[in-house]
């Protein structure tokens, strides 16, 4: 993939955000004010290979001098950061590091305190430093210029390729794949409700609690909707935003509003249990995000779309141990174990869900299923290929659409799909 294409695409597209279980390594804390966002893709160093469960060579390599630093925007009480913490735990186990070789800084705001944290970690001897929030990127770049011998890896960002710094890297996951699978779970539940006469086919309306109207959120809710539509053709969806990543009261209120507007199933791209709690109270099925929501919605939770950061943390740190280059930009999905869904709530999901999920996951892994297959949706009644040819507003998508699908996370790792498709109503506050 050519760097010039990636840079042009980054300039042309607007990118969005992310979210995400817990670590026991050394933690240092600072103040926190902001949440998270997204990433961009270019595999310049080498072809990425998953090493999630592969610590081959770790015993023979000298790991005694390795020290890892990580900067979190939140802590273990917030789903997005807790998933990153779980990934760090997986990396420690996979590579045989001791806990005193990892220094974690929690609740680091997206401001100068991130730079201070990065410098402190470098001064403490860290060979590689990670940061997990979109707003950390500029401060990581600043530190990277001053410590060229240290590798700086940033989740959800997009500036590594254009920075000209060989020690700066971006990483993300193909979370849209797990959202699609969780959408299939939702669509099967809607079918069951139709078959039982709980609703009629024309009332198969889902509600979606979104954080911000950014590309990552739009990509996520669209893939969730397309998953549901693949098994329940009459489904529609209403999206409302909270304009916050982690606002429990706001997410709860938006979920209640969506239910009042006729949503018979709820999902979310937000970090708290606010929406599942509202769904449980209203006895409405819900698909969560980051973590299993059965603890707060035992009778309503179906599953949650999840991210596993362990493959990347293992990959990046192992490359430092081995002295091999880290990809400038990295993104993986189901095939490499980087995304998934939480355990199906057998008390709530429709009969046959597990078998269908296995079928869909297998198709994603072997590439026979493309989430953004352009034959499965329209925009204002038209095919997106036709709009690219006839509408200047859609010409920017020409590099992404070919072979019958939108190549999400293939040209760049950052979610780029921000097209509003038919069947989804988006309401902004």
Image (cartoon, rainbow, N blue to C red):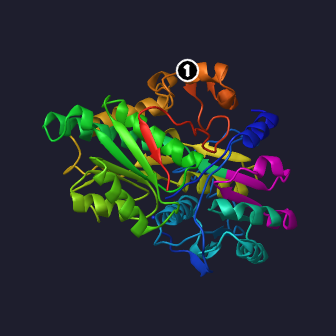
Q: Residues within 10 Å of mark 1 (few under 14, many from 20)?
A: some
- Disc tally is 1
Q: Quadrant of the N terminus?
A: top right
Considering depth in this image, is 77 or 128 the residue closer to the camera? Answer: 77
Describe the element under mark 1 as helix, strand or loop.
loop
**Residue 293 in sight from this viewpoint:** no
Q: Quadrant of residue 98?
A: bottom right
Is 176 covered by the magenta stretch?
Answer: no
| Side of 260 where 96 appears, left or right | right
Considering depth in this image, is 264 or 120 the residue closer to the camera? Answer: 264
Judged from this view, the residue extending furthest toward the left is: 196
Residue found 53% across the figure and 42% down from its top: 219
Image coordinates for residue 88, horizontal then vertical, percent = 56, 63
Image coordinates for residue 276, horizontal then vertical, percent = 32, 59
**Residue 199 in sight from this viewpoint:** yes
Considering depth in this image, is 353 or 256 the residue closer to the camera? Answer: 256
Image coordinates for residue 114, horizontal then vertical, percent = 71, 72
Range of the magenta residues? 143-170
| Side of 322 where 179 appears, left or right | left
Q: Does 140 appear above or below 207?
A: below
Q: Quadrant of residue 7?
A: top right
| Side of 169 where 89 appears, left or right | left
Image coordinates for residue 290, horizontal then vertical, percent = 44, 57
Residue found 43% across the figure and 29% down from its top: 363
| Side of 403 where 271 appears, left or right | left
Q: Does 372 appear above or below 32?
A: above
Q: Does 87 appear above or below 351?
A: below
Q: Residue tagged by mark 1?
A: 404
């Amino acid at each position: 993939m050519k760097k010039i294409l990636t840079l042009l695409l980054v300039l042309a597209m607007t990118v969005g955000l992310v979210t995400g279980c817990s670590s026991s390594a050394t933690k240092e804390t600072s103040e926190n004010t902001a949440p998270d966002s997204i990433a961009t893709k270019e595999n310049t160093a080498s072809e990425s290979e998953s090493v999630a469960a592969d610590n081959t060579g770790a015993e023979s390599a000298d790991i005694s001098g390795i020290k890892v630093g990580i900067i979190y925007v939140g802590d273990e009480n917030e789903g997005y950061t807790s998933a990153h913490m779980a990934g760090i735990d997986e990396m420690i186990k996979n590579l045989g590091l001791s806990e005193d070789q990892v220094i974690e800084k929690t609740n680091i705001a997206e401001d100068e305190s991130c730079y201070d944290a990065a410098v402190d970690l470098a001064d403490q001897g860290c060979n590689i430093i990670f940061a997990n929030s979109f707003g950390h990127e500029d401060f990581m770049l600043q530190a990277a210029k001053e410590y060229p011998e240290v590798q700086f890896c940033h989740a959800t960002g997009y500036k590594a390729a254009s920075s000209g710094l060989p020690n700066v890297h971006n990483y993300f996951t193909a979370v849209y794949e797990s959202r699609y699978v969780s959408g299939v779970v939702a669509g099967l539940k809607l079918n069951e409700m139709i078959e039982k006469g709980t609703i009629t086919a024309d009332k198969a309306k889902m509600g979606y609690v979104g954080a911000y109207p950014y590309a990552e959120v739009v990509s996520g809710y669209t893939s969730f909707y397309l998953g549901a539509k693949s098994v329940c053709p009459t489904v529609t969806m209403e999206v409302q935003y909270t304009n916050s990543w982690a606002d429990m009261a706001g997410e709860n209120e938006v979920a209640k509003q969506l239910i009042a507007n006729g949503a018979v199933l709820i999902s979310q791209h937000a970090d708290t249990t606010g929406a599942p709690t509202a769904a449980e109270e209203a006895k409405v099925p819900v698909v969560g995000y980051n973590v299993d929501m059965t603890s707060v919605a035992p009778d309503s939770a179906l599953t949650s779309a999840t991210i596993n950061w362990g493959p990347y943390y293992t990959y990046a740190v192992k490359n430092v141990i081995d002295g091999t280059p880290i990809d400038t930009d990295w993104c993986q999905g189901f095939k490499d174990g980087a995304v998934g869904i939480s355990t199906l709530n057998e008390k709530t999901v429709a009969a046959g869900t597990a078998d269908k999920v296995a079928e869909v996951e297998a198709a994603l892994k072997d590439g026979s299923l493309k989430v953004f297959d352009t034959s499965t949706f329209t925009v204002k009644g038209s095919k997106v290929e036709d709009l690219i040819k006839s509408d200047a507003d859609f010409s920017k998508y020409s590099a992404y659409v070919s072979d019958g699908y939108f190549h999400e996370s293939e040209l760049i790792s950052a979610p780029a799909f921000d097209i509003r498709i038919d069947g989804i109503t988006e309401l902004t506050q």
